[in-house]
Amino acid sequence: MRIGQGYDVHRFAVGRELRLGGVLIPFEKGLLGHSDADVLLHAISDALLGALALRDIGFHFPDTDPGYEGADSKVLLGKVLEMVAASGYKVGNIDATVIAERPKINPHILEMVTVIAGILKINEDQISIKATTNEKMGFAGREEGIAATAVALLLLGETQKK
């Protein structure tokens, strides 16, 4: 087995949609980034890549490449899963946390789990997503952006969904 951890952060921007965990979240601001800036999917991608010692999503999908401008992070996570499979591993489980004062994340977690399980071709009970605030401290506490962390466990073998 192999374990990886990921972290991502993006600042808020007016005029952008907010996508977290592959889900469109109603909010007055979105996150700024070269892609759709989905911090949760980016953290999960980095955790998976880290478990394989394959660097990070910025290395594989650089923001200097115009081909990734506005990229759908669900597609990027799917490409990361292909790297996992090509390395002879399958996803054991994902444990992730979204850090934001607003919007409230909990009402969207079940949908995020469903979307992520579908992309990673695993069961929903293999994914844990939690939400927390930063208790009004730091950039997240000042509502300047959102952060996410993730840990991934990879196991030898083919990806199989029950």
Image: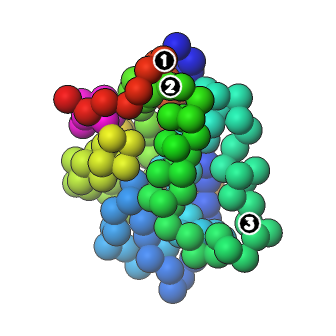
Please tell me whether residue 60 is drawn above or below residue 126 in the rendered image: below
* Type of amino acid at the residue the image marks with label 3: Asp
Query: What secondary structure is found at the residue carrying circle 2?
Result: strand
Q: Residues within 10 Å of mark 3 (few under 14, many from 20)?
A: some
Q: Which residues are magenta?
A: 122-128
Q: Position of residue 151 (x, y in %)?
A: 51, 29
Quote the CA–CA distance across marks 3 and 2: 27 Å
Q: Residues within 10 Å of mark 2 (few under 14, many from 20)?
A: many
Q: Mark 2 — residue?
A: 89
Residue at figure coordinates x 61%, y 48% from the top left: 8
Q: Position of residue 107 (x, y in %)?
A: 22, 54
Residue at figure coordinates x 65%, y 70% from the top left: 68
Q: Mark 3 — residue?
A: 63
Residue situated furthest bottom in the rendering: 15
Q: Is residue 31 visible?
A: no
Q: Residues within 10 Å of mark 1 (few under 14, many from 20)?
A: some
Please tell me whether residue 139 is drawn above or below residue 135 in the rendered image: below
Image quadrant of residue 62? bottom right
Quote the CA–CA distance across marks 3 and 1: 31 Å
* Type of amino acid at the residue the image marks with label 1: Leu
Closer to viewer: mark 3 or mark 1? 1
Q: Is residue 157 left or right of residue 128?
A: right
Quote the CA–CA distance across marks 2 and 1: 4 Å
Q: Mark 1 — residue?
A: 156
* Type of amino acid at the residue the image marks with label 2: Tyr
Q: Position of residue 81 (x, y in %)?
A: 49, 42
Q: Is residue 100 left or right of residue 54?
A: left
Q: Which mark is residue 116?
A: none
Query: What secondary structure is found at the residue carrying circle 1?
Result: strand
Image quadrant of residue 108? bottom left
* Label whose residue precedes the other's in the sequence (3 or 2): 3
